[in-house]
């Protein structure tokens, strides 16, 4: 959005409100200008703060990658072996080595699994968590829940709350 052109306001005040024009010129116009300058200064400071944060984040990401890359090379094959032993159809592993405590992410049968701080934990701990995930039913995230609004489903449920009544013979 463009800024308001105060010159139009000044002309209108001179034409219609000439008795209050000196008040505007002496008191209001300088304060409007100061407010605009203050707004610009605050925006510049926020941009500088954001850029410093990004630079610091890039710096720590590079340091973390240097530390985590060799550790990941050592653990990757063993973690893949454990995952393939427990699950079937394990997808590609993803790990963000820029993070301080990287999390391992992969998909199994369309289900996304995440294991936090894999480089700082033992294989046994991770294996126990994977075994627990295998027996645990997939979580129903809010976006994947199916709602039928009380109308019943299209597969034998009448919506009466009595269960599947489509194949009852009487």
Image (cartoon, rainbow, N blue to C red):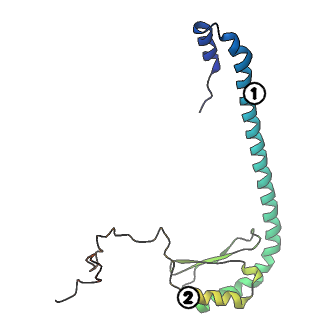
Q: Residue at x 64, y 14 (%)?
A: 10
Specify the quadrant of the image occupied by residue 59.
bottom right
Q: Residue at x 74, y 71 (%)?
A: 97
Can residue 152 be seen from the camera position used here? yes
Can residue 81 be seen from the camera position used here? no
- Where 123 falls versus 92 (above or below)? below
Q: Nearer the viewer, residue 169 or 82?
A: 169
Query: In the rendered view of the protein, which quadrant contains the C terminus?
Result: bottom left
Q: Nearer the viewer, residue 80 or 113?
A: 113
Specify the quadrant of the image occupied by residue 5.
top right
Residue tagged by mark 2? 134
- Where 25 falls versus 119 (above or below)? above
- As drawn, is 69 to the left or to the right of 149? right
- Where 168 falls versus 13 (above or below)? below
Crowd around label 1: few <14 · some 14–19 · many ≥20 (10 Å): few
Q: Residue at x 72, y 74 (%)?
A: 102
Secondary structure category for the residue under label 1? helix
| Residue 68 image label | none
Q: Nearer the viewer, residue 147 or 123?
A: 147
Closer to the camera: disc 2 or disc 1? 1
Crowd around label 2: few <14 · some 14–19 · many ≥20 (10 Å): some
Residue tagged by mark 1? 34
Query: In the rendered view of the protein, which quadrant contains the N terminus?
Result: top right
């Amino acid at each position: 959005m463009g800024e308001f052109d105060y010159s139009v306001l000044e002309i209108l005040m001179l034409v219609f409100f000439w008795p209050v024009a000196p008040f505007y010129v002496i008191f209001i116009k300088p304060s409007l200008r100061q407010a605009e300058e203050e707004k610009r200064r605050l925006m510049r400071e926020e941009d500088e703060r954001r850029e410093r944060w990004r630079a610091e984040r890039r710096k720590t990401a590079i340091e973390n990658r240097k530390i985590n890359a060799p550790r990941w090379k050592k653990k990757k094959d063993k973690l893949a072996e454990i995952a393939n032993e427990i699950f079937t159809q394990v997808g590609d592993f993803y790990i963000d080595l820029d993070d301080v405590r990287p999390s391992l992410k992969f998909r199994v049968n369309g289900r996304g699994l995440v294991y936090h701080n894999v480089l700082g934990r033992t294989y046994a701990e991770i294996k126990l968590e994977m075994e627990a995930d295998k027996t645990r039913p997939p979580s129903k995230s809010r976006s994947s829940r199916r709602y039928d609004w009380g109308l019943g489903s299209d597969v034998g449920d009448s919506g009466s709350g009595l269960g599947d009544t489509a194949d009852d013979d009487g």
